[in-house]
Image: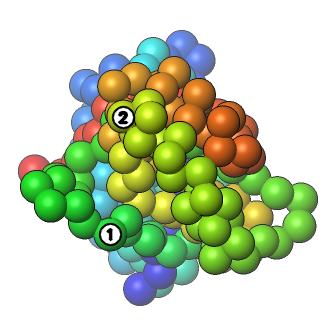
Amino acid sequence: MTEVFIEREFEPGLTVEDVWGMVRESGHCFSLHGAHWHGSLLTAGGRRMLCHFSSPDAESVRIALRQSGTPLGPVWPGTVHEAPLHPGADPGYSNVLVTRSWSQPVELADIQAVEDAGAWCLEAHDVQFVRTIFAADRRRMVCLYRAPDAESVRLAQSQAGMPVEHVLAFETIVPP
C-alpha cells in the first residue's frame, strides 16, 4: 500500500461536522477503490485540510474522491517520518503544521540537518517536532509540531532558517 496525501482548500471554511459528512458520503467509494482514510488535519477557520490515506496508488484516491463528488486538490504519495520520542511525550499529539515546497527535489536528510542545527530555536519557543510527511517527488513536505500556538512555530522556523510556505494551527480528525 502507498501512503497518499491530499491538500484541499475550501471557501467558505469547513467545520468538523462537514468533514464527517464528507467521510460518510465518500466511504463506499473509498472501499470500492481500496483507499483507507487515516484522518485529516483541518486548519483553524476550516479553509485548508490535509487528508491521509493508504491506497494501492494515488490515482485510486483521486478516482474515489471524484466519484464521490468530494472536492479535489493536489494528491501526492509520500512517506511519514516520526520524530524520536521524548520521555513522556504523546507521539500522536500535534497542533501546528508547516508546509514547505521546492522547485527542485531535495533530500530529507539535508532538510533535517538544517532543522537539527536550529533545534535551540524550537526549544526556545517551546516547540516540539512530531513528524514529517515527505512527498515521493521530494518537492513537498508537511511538518507537524506541538506548540503553544502557530506564531511560536513561525518564529522558531524563521530563526532556524527553515524554508516555510505556511504555518497553520489545526485540529485532528481521525476515524473512531
Q: Taking 30 as reference, is 167 left or right?
A: right
- Say which mark, if any, is on residue 126: 2
Residue at left 33%, top 25%? 148
Q: Position of residue 139 (x, y in %)?
A: 76, 64
Are there few (<14), some (14-19), or many (20+) residues within 10 Å of tag 2?
some
Quadrant hosting residue 95:
top left
Q: Is residue 132 above or below residue 43?
A: below
- Which of the marked residues, 2 or 1, is nearer the chain's N terminus? 1
- CB contact under 8 Å: marks 2 and 1: no
Three-letter amino acid code at the position of disc 1: Pro
Image vertical order of residue 133 relative to residue 47, above or below: below
Q: Closer to the camera, 34 or 145?
A: 145
User: How far apart, in angstroms, are the residues tagged by discs 2 and 1?
Assistant: 17 Å
- Assess disc 1: are there few (<14), some (14-19) or many (≥20) residues with their C-alpha within 10 Å of its C-alpha: few
Relative horizontal placement of residue 81, taking residue 137 as reference (left or right): left
Left or right of 102, for residue 149: left
Q: Position of residue 85 (x, y in %)?
A: 25, 66
Name the residue at 53% across, 41% down: 121
Q: Residue at x 55, y 61 (%)?
A: 116
Residue 12, horizontal then vertical, whole percent: 54, 13
Nearest to the eye among marks 2 and 1: give it. Answer: 2
Horizontal side of residue 104 vs 158, given as left or right: right
Image position of 148 with respect to 174: above or below: above
Q: Amino acid at mark 2?
A: Asp
Question: Which quarter of the figure has residue 94?
Answer: top left
Read off the residue under disc 1.
Answer: 84
